[in-house]
Amino acid sequence: MNNGSSVAELAETLRLQWDRYPSGEKLPSSRLLMEQHRVSPVTVSRAIALLAAEGLVIARPGAGVFRAERPRTRAAAGDVSWQEVTLSAHGASGAPLAEATGVLATLTVPPVDVIDLNSGYPHASLLPERGLADALARAGRRPGAWSRPPVEGLAELRAWFAREIGGPEGGLAASDVLIAAGGQSALTVALRSLAPPGAPVLVESPTYPGILAVARAAGLRPVPVPVDGEGLRTDLLAHAFTTTGARLLVCQPLFQNPTGVTLSDRRRAEVLELARAAGAFVVEDDYARLLAHADAPALPRPLAADDPDGVVVHVRSLTKAASPSLRIAAVIARGPAYERLRATQAVDSFFVSRPLQEATLELVSSPAWSRHLRTLGVGLRDRRQTLATALAQHLPALPPAPLAAGGYLAWLRLPHGSDESALVSAALRAGVGVTPGAPYFAAEPPEPHLRLSHVAAVSSSQLAEGVARLAAAWAATSAL
């Protein structure tokens, strides 16, 4: 059982017992709750905090936890039907609307009894929780840690990102780096800054739904360019630049989401040449570079490291390798594009929290960070191998999914005519969460697909069990 489910279960148990205590009576001590329910001190503390937030208990430091007065009955809900008229008028004006279905599908926390093969965030057992806690504690004691940071981000953190992305030869400077509040925020700032509403933006097909959501919310028109085994098809990219007049391309050259494909060396050069010829920017979403597996070959350099002319706007996030709550990313840009990105972010959010930047700097500067990345690489390799074995054992009739030595994805192509939505629903009923393929396409999907993630399951054994449950759902829907 993971810690989140333990907290929820203990809180629910205490809610059911709440009526047994008169108002003001003291609840059992934390030690007794730990012994009775066989949970950790952290679980007890979080469950009590949850009940306190609901107004059911009052925690008095040094004295204990006491039952609060019965909460007042909530007032009857008001009539919000008027909002339909106002909001529909907003949509009729042609203004862009946020469409987050694909994004929310991967952010939804599944029920306790459902195995998660959906989320792109690694399970807590793969993350450096102790290192993060230590870094946050050290950061909080730094002089000025709670003062206002520079709009662009802390100079030391910008310099660290410049070295990490540009390489030891120093191709990038700290002045090229803008600190953003996570990869999704960085993509939002980049797309809103680099293309006007109504403009076309070229995207890979299939691609990460978050890219499509950001583009559409910014009023841009996503134009799909297919991906094959070598990555983005540059023959079709050339045609897309010519026919659409697009001045912006968004791509994931390394361990692309959802296919896991890495852009070949030949096509890397072609992408940059085509973008330069079109006078276009390339937004490089380098989301998975820190998720290389222990057996991965040497990784290609970022496109930004080979681009002195400011064609590439590079996005690098630490979130997936560190924690979903470490919303820290870097945006690399040069020239007027950097100033426009900086202005957009300043208007949107002023700056990124200084304590979070200080904690990030503490984390990545410590020896624990490199040790963590090595451990993470081993864990990801083992999970990939477990997933490959489970797919071959339980779903041998499906075409083998190429599993990259980086990232966390399997992109399963289903037989022509399969109902991926029905399969996803059947899988959920069988106790496993998977992702349908349709949200990954900017236009009509050519074939049905499923996307599986191997990082969110509690363990490798649970991962294998999840594939077995998926196979049972597949058998049930195939028989219909």
Image (tube, helix red, strand yellow):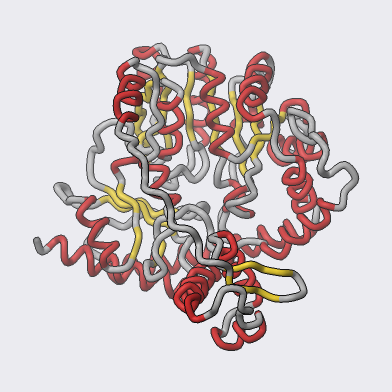
Q: Is residue 235 above or below residue 276?
A: below
The picture quadrant where one finds residue 427 is bottom left
Work out whether residue 236 can be spotted.
no
Name the residue located 78 percent from the left edge and 61 percent from the top edge.
Answer: 134
Across and down, in percent, residue 169 comes to 77, 35
Q: Nearer the viewer, residue 320 or 371?
A: 320
395 on left or right of 116: left
86 on left or right of 349: left
28 on left or right of 218: right
The picture quadrant where one finds residue 78 is top left
Name the residue located 60 percent from the left edge and 35 percent from the top edge.
Answer: 315
Q: Is residue 311 above or below residue 432?
A: above
Q: Nearer the viewer, residue 473 or 66?
A: 66
Work out whether residue 89 can be spotted.
yes
Name the residue located 31 percent from the left edge and 46 percent from the top edge.
Answer: 437
Name the residue located 63 percent from the left edge and 79 percent from the top edge.
Answer: 26
